[in-house]
Structure formats: C-alpha cells, structure tokens
Image (cartoon, rainbow, N blue to C red):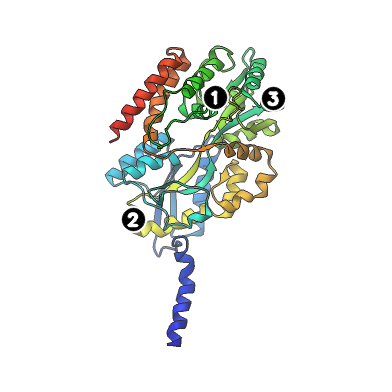
Amino acid sequence: MKKVLVALLVLASVAAPIIAGGQQGSEPKGPVTISLWTKEGEADGALQWVEALAADFSAQHENITVEVLNKEVEALREDFQTAALAGTAPDLLWSVSDHAGPFTTAGLIQPVDDFVDTSKYVESVVMNGSTWAVPIASGNHLMLMANKKYVSELPATTDEFIEVAKSLTKDDMYGLAYNLGEAFWLAPWLGGFDGSVFAADGVTPTLDTPAMLNTLKFLRSLKFDYGVTPTESDYAVADTLFKEGKAAMIINGDWSIGGYKEALGDDLLIGRLPKVSSTGKYPAPYTSGVYFFVPADLPAEKESAVKMFIEYVTSEKVQTEMLEKLSRLPGLRSALSSPVIENDPLMKGSVAQMEVGTPMPTVLEMRAVWDAINPELSAVMAGSETPEEAVKKMQEAAVNGIANLK
C-alpha cells in the first residue's frame, strides 16, 4: 500500500505543472510543419522579427518547421474565414483582438485555457467563460507623438493642441497628421467627449448622440476651420509626413514606435492625447493587443508543436526582446516590470496613454459599428456631409448591420 501511495505522489508531482495552467507542449516524434498567418508587416520590422523567431524556433526543434505568411489585417480575417470553411485553415493566427468576435461566432477558433496558463498574461479575450486568445503584445493603442524639433512639450488640452498645431502649419509643413477617414482614429476622441459606441449592454449602438456629434465637429474643425491637417491623409500619407519631418505631430499606435525611433532618433516624443477642454476628459483609445488564435480544426498531431511555439514567443526572453526591438508592451505580465520600460521615456509615455484607454469590444456587433462609422466619417472629412447628417446615418447603418448578423 505504501509503494502505491509513493507512486501516486510521484505521478502527481510530475503531472502538477501540466494540470495547472494548460498542458505543456512536448517534442513531436516526427516532422511537423506549422503554418502561421500574421498581420505583422515589414514597415516597422515586425514581420522580419516574426520570421526570425520562426527560424530560431525551428533551429531549436529539428522536427518542427514554422512557415510564416503575412496578410493585411482585414485580408487575414476574410481569408481565414474562407479557408476555415474550406478546411484549409492555417495552424495558428497572430492577429488583433477584434477578430475574436466573428471567429468565435462562426466557431472557427478554440479556447486556449488548456493551451497555456492564462494567469501569466495580461487581460485577454474572454467570452462566455472561456479565454479565446493568448496575448503576445498588449496595448495596440493610439497616442500622441511629436517631433522635438518642433514640439518640446506635448499639449495638455485640446485648446493648447490646436494652438500648437496652428503655429506649426505653414508652407508644406503640417501641425498634425493622422488617418483622417478611419474610425479607429475617431474612437479616442469619442471617449474624450464622454461617448461610447455601445450602450451599457455592450451591443446596442449609440452613435446618434451629442458626444459623437461633438467628436465629428472637432475632427472636422481641425481640417476645415484650423487647417492643421493635410487635405487628404490616410495612414501611409500621415506616416510618411511624420517620418520626413513634414508633420510636427502624429496620432498613431504603439506598433509604429520602432519605425519612428529609427526615423527621428532622440527627437521622438510620446504621451497622452490632450485632454478635451470642453469636457475635462482624456481621449480613450481602444486598447487590445496582438494575440495568438488557435483554429478549431487544428490537427491533433500539430497541437503539441503549436503549444511549444506559443510558449517560446511568450517566454520572458522573447517578450523582452520584442520590447527592445519593436517597442511594444509585452503580453506576459512578468515582462511588464522590465527595466526597459522604467528607463525608457517613450515606453513610459505609451504606458501613460494605455492607462486611460478602454478595452476594445470583441463582440460581433463591433464589426457592424466600424462599418457604419467609416463611410460617414469619410464623408464628413471630405466636406460632403454634415456631422448632423452623419450621426443619423451611422446609427441607422449600425442598427441594420447588427440586424443582418442574426
């Protein structure tokens, strides 16, 4: 009886780390190839870093090969949905949190509670009692950046913001550049004007509101009343102007910090978007991050290799390397206390903005809201529609879009 008890205790001690926090991956006995789709691009060196990680991991595990394929964010979502339905899905996704809604609704991804110890990570995508993603990087939030050659201290309020931008706009130089027609860039200001895209239930759209109206009027005024932004400016235009020193300030996300450090060096300044003067509230950019999603139909023979790759990318060593190379905040909690953050004013500025952000809704209804805002925002910024007309059309489109989801 004593031998049996000892054997059970030994077995329990071995099994403990496996049961607590998801089963750990183990080396496959034969060759396994993991196909990884990532939204990371080349502009900030992120795709090159992902490819280097895949190569390094494969070199450490002779039976595992990781093949990386880059896709633009929306193309990744659409192509994955098509591939999953056709039975040709990749083995792992590296993408943004707002994909979780459509993927879970369609049953295309699986919970990760058994893949990893979720307590090690920052807040992830949790729906219906399950965790649906493993955080790689946290934040993914917009913030204010400036070129110190023109701006020595970031403006604290929107009144100051406008005055600074006006003083710097002359000839081919702009005080501010950002992606004028994209709803993601509108969202922080909506929070600053005390609004939200959903009611308290988290799914009913609230776009025809005074807060949205004031947000649109504010954004419109930057272009038409104060003339501090380019007449036409999408993401690429704004990015180029800032890198070339033709825009003093830019609103962009943490994913762009690495590229701007390379372009501006010590002249880069980062901090919170200015407090809205009329409300006294800080703009609240959506925060989310970059995550691993595991397809629902992942072949059983690849499961262990996928777990091992996730463990490798989210190890403290690699998470710290991401912080240093790409200036992205880690998804692993322990890496957030890295001296790299404490000693870097740019990272401290990014964390300061994230502190007043708001989590990105991951419900399927969010897709309908984005689709409702984008065309009306573009029309307002093109001068072809008034903010009053836009808020009514947004609301109607969002309600209809959500109805069509059912």
Q: Are marks 3 and 1 in contact (CB under 8 Å)?
A: no
Q: Nearer the viewer, residue 287 or 206?
A: 206
Q: Secondary structure at mark 3?
A: loop
Residue 251, quarter of the rendered image: top right
Between the C-alphas of marks 3 and 1, the distance is 17 Å
Between the C-alphas of marks 1 and 2, the distance is 43 Å
Q: Secondary structure at mark 2?
A: loop
**Residue at (42, 84) in percent of width and height:** 4
Q: Position of residue 102 (x, y in %)?
A: 35, 40
Q: Are marks 1 and 2 in contact (CB under 8 Å)?
A: no
134 lies left or right of 203: right
Between the C-alphas of marks 3 and 2, the distance is 54 Å
Q: Nearer the viewer, residue 89 or 58?
A: 89
Residue annotated with mark 1: 178
Residue annotated with mark 3: 151
Label located before the other in sequence (3 or 2): 3
Q: Position of residue 332 (x, y in %)?
A: 55, 51
Q: Amino acid at mark 2?
A: Pro
Residue annotated with mark 2: 299
Q: Are marks 3 and 2 in contact (CB under 8 Å)?
A: no
Q: Secondary structure at mark 1?
A: loop
Q: Amino acid at mark 1?
A: Tyr
**Residue at (38, 38) in percent of width and height:** 77
Q: Residues within 10 Å of mark 3 (few under 14, many from 20)?
A: some
Residue 72 seen from this side: no
Which of label 3 and label 2 is nearer to you? 3
108 lies left or right of 54: left
